[in-house]
Amino acid sequence: MNENREVTSKKEILDFITKNPTCYIATIDGNQPRVRGLLMYRADEDGILFQTWSNKDIYRQIQQNPNVELCFVSHNGSKQVRIAGKAEFIDDQKLKEEIVDKRSFIKPWVEEMGYDVMKVFKVINCVATVWTPKVNFKQKEYIQF
């Protein structure tokens, strides 16, 4: 997808975030927002998958408040796709094994700590909005998926 082209559909949003899997995730810690970088695993019509670890603050924060927002940015910074939704815990050993298989950098952590500390979430009930310089001062449009 051309990074300067407008994103107007669910399919285009999924294509964009699949091509730009590094994102920022915002969670709530009490009444304080917390933001950090994250590498999304997969996105489709059912939601956006990512993994984290049970000893991380993000895991505790999502348990306390599952409402999150993700922000995906194009390589040249000319486009952002923000997605708000609810992070739902996924207890699926085969999915964990698939993630470790595809992300070899995770393997040493799993070998040291075990699969139990690995936590997988799917962001569901997603609502996306797209920012580009062209729409900077326009009213936001929302796309649900």
Image (spheres, rainbow, N blue to C red):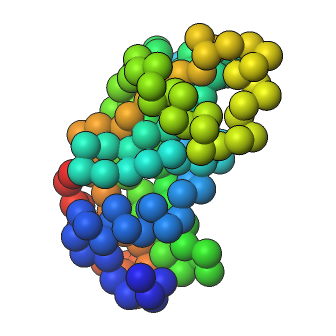
| Residue closer to the observer: 54 or 101 | 101
* Residue 32 seen: no
Image coordinates for residue 18, horizontal then vertical, percent: 45, 61
Vertical order, 112 against 70 (above or below): above
Quarter of the rendering occupied by the N terminus: bottom left
Residue 17 placement, left or right of 139: right
Residue 26 placement, left or right of 85: right
Q: Residue at x 41, y 17 (%)?
A: 91
Q: Residue at x 53, y 22 (%)?
A: 119
Q: How many marks?
A: 0
Vertical order, 93 against 99 (above or below): above
| Residue closer to the observer: 141 or 42 | 42
Residue 25 placement, left or right of 123: right
Vertical order, 103 against 108 (above or below): below
Image coordinates for residue 29, horizontal then vertical, percent: 57, 23
* Residue 144 seen: yes
| Residue closer to the observer: 70 or 31 | 70
Vertical order, 14 against 41 (above or below): below
Q: Residue at x 74, y 13 (%)?
A: 113
Q: Residue at x 59, y 56 (%)?
A: 22
Residue 101 image-quadrant placement: top right
Image coordinates for residue 5, horizontal then vertical, percent: 38, 87
Residue 114 image-quadrant placement: top right
Image coordinates for residue 132, horizontal then vertical, percent: 44, 79
Residue 53 image-quadrant placement: top right
| Residue closer to the observer: 89 or 5 | 89
